[in-house]
Amino acid sequence: MDRWSLSSGWPLNKAALRLLMLPLLPLYIWRLGLGQGLVTFYRFLLGEDGFVIHRSERDPGTIIRDDSTDAWVFQQIFILCDYRLLVGRSDVRVIIDAGAYVGFSSIYFAELYPHAFIYALEPEESNFQALQRNTRHYPNIKAIQAAVWKEDGFLEVKDVASGQWSFVVQEHSEGRGQQVPAISIQSLMEQYRLPRIDILKIDIEGAEDAVFEGPGCHTWLPKVRVLALELHDHLYPGSERNFLEAIATYECTVRTTGENIIFDFPELPEPGVLEAPRRRYS
């Protein structure tokens, strides 16, 4: 497997990846403008990295690191607009970005909702440093080096050799990996005095299994207006089980975009009013 395959996480050679990217050129030009769109597209196409992208004259720039998966995540967020179903929400004040990677999704949310405050959580050290650099010009983004988990504590970050976008955290440490703080959604809300979460985005490489384990998630889930979640059962079989059991308790509207599932809770349910659920899927 060559560097392109390791960077992208896809078991494809460079020529195959180039062919897949070619139809996206008009989108690059539409999103970034003619000049920046062409330059960025061909840099990505040729496998270049280690440069800064300015999406507009006012954009302070986002960094694409050397030999990384940054280009692919940038493409998902800013070119393919994987979170486009989150556009046009009313009264968005609090956004939690769990699994913020290098900050692209947090920046997308900050520009989409400039009056909202974004809590961007990323456990892995190199990704967190890039997150801080990319979001330093956004006063409404708070970068937090921590892993979202079912309870507070410490976890070990593990490199599964699938690129920087796929570090995982694990509970049973052998003392060899990077130790990072773990925090539950409920603790995060208590620490920052958040009465509700308007948008909760979760992309945490299979750790959603722990986050939604047991009755603890029902202390904070009723306070979420919109949940944007990427499941990883295809990589970690069984990791979606606890989530599916938890969400079945709630009335919600479900839509998909890219790799994400968007759950809309039209009215915030009150805790304790969960014994007679109604489900609505669309």
Image: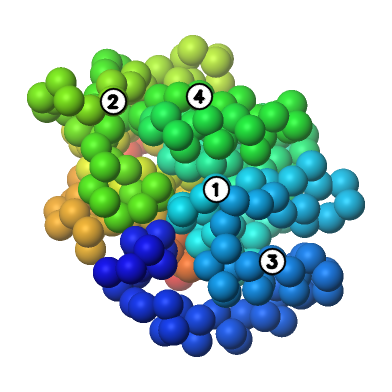
Crowd tier of the residue under label 2, counting other residues whose Cα lies within 10 Å: few below 14, some 14–19, many 20 or above:
some
The secondary structure type at the circle numbered 1 is: loop
Question: Looking at the image, do the residues carrying marks 4 and 1 touch, with CB atoms under 8 Å apart?
Answer: no
Q: Position of residue 72 (x, y in %)?
A: 51, 62
Residue at 56% x, 21% y is: 194
Q: Which residue sits at x=52%, y=50%?
A: 66
What's the residue type where badge 3 is placed?
Answer: Thr
The residue indicated by pointer 3 is: 40
What number is the disc on residue 204?
none
Q: Check disc 4 and report the residue beneath it.
A: 144
Q: Give the image quarter of residue 95.
A: top right
Residue annotated with mark 1: 65
Q: Nearer the viewer, residue 26 or 280?
A: 26
Q: Amino acid at mark 4?
A: Ile
Rounded to the nearest angstrom, the CA distance separating label 3 from label 4 is: 29 Å
- Of tags 3 and 4, the one toward the viewer is 3
79 above or below 194?
below
Q: Could you tell which of marks 4 and 1 lies nearer the N-terminus? A: 1
Image quadrant for the C terminus? bottom left
Between marks 1 and 2 in the image, the one whose residue lies nearer the viewer: 1
Camera-near label (2 vs 4) is 2
**Is 278 positioned to the left or the right of 242 in the image?**
right
Quarter of the image holding residue 130? Answer: top right
User: Does label 3 or label 4 sit earlier along the sequence?
Assistant: 3
Residue 161, x across and y down, in percent? 26, 51
Asked if residue 181 lies left or right of residue 237, the reply is: right
- In this orientation, does residue 219 appear? no
* Disc 1 from disc 2: Cα separation: 21 Å
> Which residue is label 2 attached to?
178
Of helix, strand and loop, which one carries label 3?
A: helix
Q: CA distance from mark 3 to mark 1?
A: 14 Å
Instruction: Tell me which residue sits at (27%, 32%) in the image.
Output: 157
